[in-house]
Amino acid sequence: MDGFTVAYVPDEAGDLVSDYSTEWGGVRFESRVWEHETDEGGFRVDLKVNVLRGERLTGVEALREFIADYEEQDPGAWELERFQNGQWQGYRTEGLAFWFVGKGVGVSVRLDPRAFDDEQLTLTARGIRPGD
């Protein structure tokens, strides 16, 4: 997935998987989404992985600022915990983890917190590594 391997997906994540590309705020998103059909006939996203690429992603704090803007959060009031994913620094909050990989590159993982706990978020995030 755009130079990254997703090695762990929770068993309970839906089996409808789709990939797509978007751009927002000068940052390109390569995304993979796992979802399931609801009893009402709609669809609910269980897991979303984004590989983010853009010149404005110059460090972990620039990534934090970008994600806060994208998530429509006040950067000063958003309660985030520091997150160390291997050698990469990032942040996390309920259902969301993101980290800075290198100049111009970040990764984010979102799990539906109604269906998945914090441990599943950690396992999923730690299973994403550069590679094929």
Image (spheres, rainbow, N blue to C red):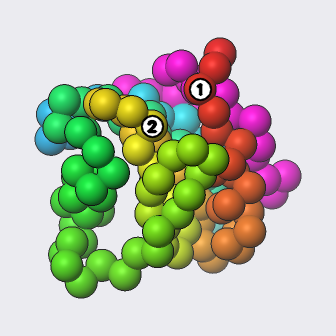
Residue at the spot 37% in from the left edge and 81% down from the top edge:
79
Q: Residue furthest front?
A: 87
The magenta span reads 1-21
Q: Is residue 40 above or below residue 98?
A: below
Res. 56 visible in picture = yes
Q: Residue 68: x, y in percent?
A: 26, 63
Q: Residue 131: x, y in percent?
A: 63, 20
- Three-letter amino acid code at the position of disc 2: Val
Could you tell me which quadrant the N terminus lies in?
top right
Question: Could you tell me how far apart the alpha carbons at marks 1 and 2 are, in whole angstroms?
Answer: 9 Å
**Residue beneath disc 2:** 101
Q: Nearer the viewer, residue 107 or 81?
A: 81
Q: Residues within 10 Å of mark 2 (few under 14, many from 20)?
A: many
Residue at the spot 63% in from the left edge and 33% down from the top edge:
129
Q: Residue 53: x, y in percent?
A: 32, 29
| Left or right side of 46 for 52 | left
* Total number of numbered discs in the rendering: 2
Label placed on residue 130: 1
